[in-house]
Amino acid sequence: MNPRSNRRIQDLKGRRALVTGASRGLGRHIALSLAGRGATVALSARDRSRLEGVRRTILRAGGKAIVCPADALSSAQVERAVETAVRRLGGLDILVNNAGGAERFAGLTELNESDWSAAYDLNVLSILRFTRAALPALRRSRSGRIINIASVSGLEPGRFNPHYSTAKAAAIHLSKVLANELAPMRITVNTVCPGPLRTDAWERNLADQAVRRRLPLSVCRKRVEQEEAAKVPLGRVGECSDVTGLVDWLAGDSAAWTTGSCLRIDGGKLRSIG
Ligand SMILES: NC(=O)c1ccc[n+]([C@@H]2O[C@H](COP(=O)([O-])OP(=O)(O)OC[C@H]3O[C@@H](n4cnc5c(N)ncnc54)[C@H](OP(=O)(O)O)[C@@H]3O)[C@@H](O)[C@H]2O)c1
């Protein structure tokens, strides 16, 4: 969502948010949208120059943001980044654990043990690292919010990337554990499970598929998009802007009584009712 487009809705004014994986893809859009609603946003990821670019975009749109780079695989870097965010923002109300993905796109027989460990580290342990580091500040907030980005593949695995889908299932489980534990502190914890989204990761996946299928990228792009759209009742791959509104809602006052929820936003892709 473009911060300009929702400039009048300032329902998160005064809230302080930290978004991981904010340098590109979905995390960048989440950060822009929260800032557009008035939150001051700390942007975290590894690539400082991209984070600075996101910060400039937010500032140009009249919002407030700082950067606090960190590798989500390093507890020491995460602690430093959260400490910087809390100090410069004067506290923390909202943590969006969005950093995630798979370093390697592959099927079961191609994956080795380190691929599985890496997927768990990035998609599960990073949530734990940021949550632990942010907990003292979130406890001091009058409305602490943790929003974890998982995936529909954590609810219904596909044939590809089982290391990723298994890690996302663990992330969903971890979110529920955290929701139960942190409810007495009035911190809510919810999971957002998007279906296929057009992001940088989507583009990398397409490039990988083009090699696997021995197709030119443009042909592969058309084919994969048609295949994926056919699996979605609403007939298209999602955009980041399809997801940001849900994150905004979870971050705000209207979601005060929502915790431990796992919310799918997938164009109807999953056919079960659970
Ligand atoms: N795209 C989809 O179809 C889809 C569907 C369902 C769920 N999701 C989930 O949505 C989230 C965002 O995905 P995306 O598609 O936007 O991915 P993306 O375009 O690849 O962006 C990933 C973000 O995570 C950051 N990141 C990756 N490794 C990191 C690390 N070790 N330390 C710190 N930051 C790291 C990246 O920044 P740096 O490289 O600068 O560190 C980047 O900002 C992920 O959790 C993903 O699993 C995506």
Image (cartoon, rainbow, N blue to C red):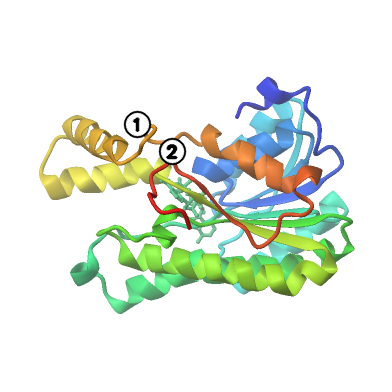
**Label 2 with label 1: CB-CB less than 8 Å:** yes
Q: Quadrant of residue 132?
A: bottom right
Q: Which residue is mark 2?
A: 267
Q: In this rendered view, identify the residue nearer to me: 42 or 108.
A: 108
Residue beneath disc 1: 235
Tally of numbered tags = 2
Position of residue 188 measured from the top left corner of the image (x, y, whole percent) = 74, 60
The answer to whether residue 130 is above or below residue 25 is below
Spot occupied by residue 229 in the image (x, y as percentages of width and height): 31, 35
Q: In whole angstroms, how far apart are the C-alphas of marks 2 and 1?
A: 8 Å
Disc 1 element: loop
Question: For the view shown, which residue lies furthest in the front direction?
Answer: 273
Q: Earlier in the sequence, mark 2 or mark 1?
A: 1
Secondary element under disc 2, as helix, strand or loop, is loop
Report the amino acid beneath label 2: Gly
Whether residue 8 is situated above or below residue 141 in the rendered picture: above
